[in-house]
Image (cartoon, helix red, strand yellow):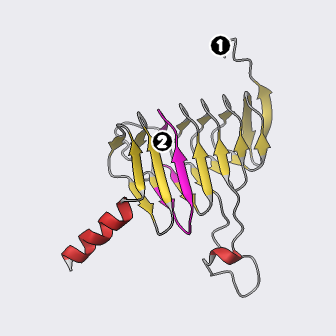
Amino acid sequence: MIRLFALYLLYLFQKIRYLGRVNLVGFSIILAFRNSSISIGKGSGLCSTPVYNLLGMYQRTILVARHGGTIHIGENVGISGSTIYAMKEIRIGDNTFIGANCKIVDNDFHAFEPGLNFTTDPLHLKMKPVSIGENCFVGMNSIILKGTVIGKNSIIGAGSVVCGKFPENVVIAGNPARIIKYRSIDSKE
């Protein structure tokens, strides 16, 4: 039985690619199911312990790709105690930081049709890719929903609920999130 479980774990982890040295602090949960994949760029770090992030980290970092979903995490990305769950595609650009307890999802998790609300069949779920550009910062406790596109050099305020397309060089905050400021990358803010 133990040997069978070990073989199953090897089967799961072959779809997870580390594209260089990756820092795993604490015990992160990383699962890529059948026909799904996860890639993590070099220099990236996944923090799953409050020892290194004291600002309200309540959970481990969890990455899940299933039903053909892909997660691509760029180089030098930092993620603290957040959940990223893909059934289609989630892309996080280089040099992006994701604060504690954030949730990033590309699907609704359940159907909204009567009688199907407990199904996880991807045929009945709405899914749209999520893209977070390079050099972004996602404040703690933020939620990024399906179909969101965030341009590079953008900041998402803590506790925001983000859905929609946003240009580069903006500060986004609120529920629902909206642009509250345009950034000038020539000056220091």
Mark 2 is on which residue type? Answer: Ile
Q: Against 164, is 169 above or below?
A: above
* Crowd tier of the residue under label 1, counting other residues whose Cα lies within 10 Å: few below 14, some 14–19, many 20 or above: few
Task: Tell me the number on the disc at residue 51.
Answer: none
Vertical order, 114 against 147 (above or below): below
Residue positioned 74% across, 42% down in the render: 174
- The structure residue drawn at horizontal position 74% and vertical position 76%, both measured from the top left corner, is 112
In the foreground, 1 or 155: 1
CA–CA distance in space, label 1 to label 2: 24 Å
Is residue 165 inside the magenta stretch? no
Could you tell me how many numbered marks the image carries? Answer: 2
The amino acid at mark 1 is Lys
Q: Quadrant of the N terminus?
A: bottom left
* Magenta region includes residue 75: yes
The quarter holding residue 187 reads top right
Q: Give the range drawn in magenta.
A: 63-83
Q: Is residue 47 above or below residue 60?
A: above
Residue 173's x, y, as percent?
73, 38
Q: Nearer the viewer, residue 43 or 15?
A: 15
Precedes in sequence: disc 1 or disc 2: 2
Q: The C terminus is located in which quarter?
A: top right
Q: Which of 146 and 114 is in front in this view?
A: 146
- The answer to whether residue 53 of the structure is visible from this angle is yes
Q: Where is mark 2, residue-wise?
A: 79
The residue to which callout 1 is attached is 188
Question: What residue occupies the far top of the structure in this picture?
Answer: 187
**Lateral position of residue 23 relative to residue 3, left or right:** right
